[in-house]
Amino acid sequence: MTVPENTIRTYKASGKLMLFGEYLVLNGSDCLAFPLKFGQTLSVTKSDELIWESYSKHGIWFSASMSSDFTILDTNNEEVAETLKQLFLVIRAEKPELDFNQRFKAEANFELNWGLGSSSTLISLLSQWSGVETKKLLDVSFGGSGYDVACATAEGPIIYANGKVKKEVHLPESITNKLLFIYLGNKQNSREEIKRFKKKEVTQDQVDTMDTIISNALQTDQIEVFEQQLDHSEELISSIIETNQLKQRLFADYPYSIKSLGAWGGDFFLATVRDLKTAKTYFEEKGYDTLFTYQEFIK
């Protein structure tokens, strides 16, 4: 069936955060991850040539045009354009029947420096448009475990391991009502963090320990027990990557749990709370004023 030239096809992909399993998911452990209410949309319409435009909340940040063989004709960012070119080359190899003379307009509804998945949502959006498996696109571009791309189309929290979603899960309100997500202010380069981690020694016992932590966290409705799992995870990852825990470094006087999310050292972290207003005041007074409750943040 031929698609009329003025038809706009629209695709959506959610951003992501990993609560448990960071780093160790690369060694086969489970991870517990969240799809977010923030994400990207992709609108595709027929054009005379391949045109790509990416927008943030502040306007256009990337643009490129390419010839029929994906030679980059014009762009404001050569590195991003080259990554996009490699993705299109894979798509054409897999789906040569596709018409690539399209105008692609990607729009993110979050700050790109938050590290919520501008790369993973791009992979998901191109997969949705083209029908090419996300793993094939991920392998030639950003790498990683693939959990973030899985979150892009998930309807709620997931357990992910070894390249697939094992199951969808639910956290009780007695837990989620006491979680606060705070932007630390340092976007991490996930590819560089992955390279660094792969040089570390990881035992099967450490992988099994993370799986047990996740299992225990999902079996409780008591915030105190949940906090024990958060703290245990921090201790485990800290010992493997030889990095001090975030709470020790910045929030030693905070009375409840602090947990890094994803690659340590940047992006968002999690704090458990008892009184939301008191917790917000604590972090805002330290200069961390981008904060979200579970209900505001998680899909």
Image: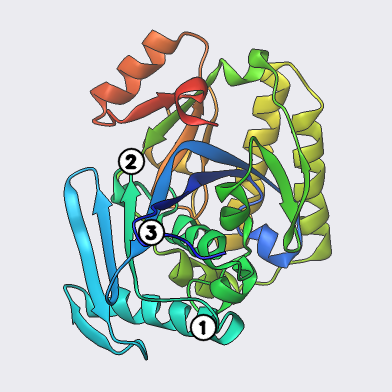
Give x and y (percent) for residue 171.
Answer: 69, 25
The answer to whether 111 appears left or right of 152 in the picture is: left
Give x and y (percent) for residue 272.
Answer: 53, 23
Q: Crowding at label 3, few (<14), some or many (≥20) Cα neighbours within 10 Å?
A: some
Give the mark nearer the N terminus: 2 vs 3.
Answer: 3
Give the mark nearer the N terminus: 3 vs 1.
Answer: 3
In this rendering, is residue 44 above or below 56? below
Q: Residue at x 64, y 35 (%)?
A: 156
Which residue in the protein does label 1 denote? 92
In what element is the residue under mark 3?
strand
The answer to whether 266 appears left or right of 77 in the picture is: right
> Mark on residue 109?
2
Q: Residue at x 55, y 31 (%)?
A: 299
State the residue in front, 271 or 73: 73
Given contact means CB atoms under 8 Å apart, are the residues at marks 3 and 1 in contact? no
Give x and y (percent) for residue 101.
Answer: 35, 75
Quote the CA–CA distance across marks 3 and 1: 16 Å
Which residue in the protein does label 3 denote? 44
In this rendering, is residue 156 above or below 7? above
The answer to whether 190 appears left or right of 50 in the picture is: right
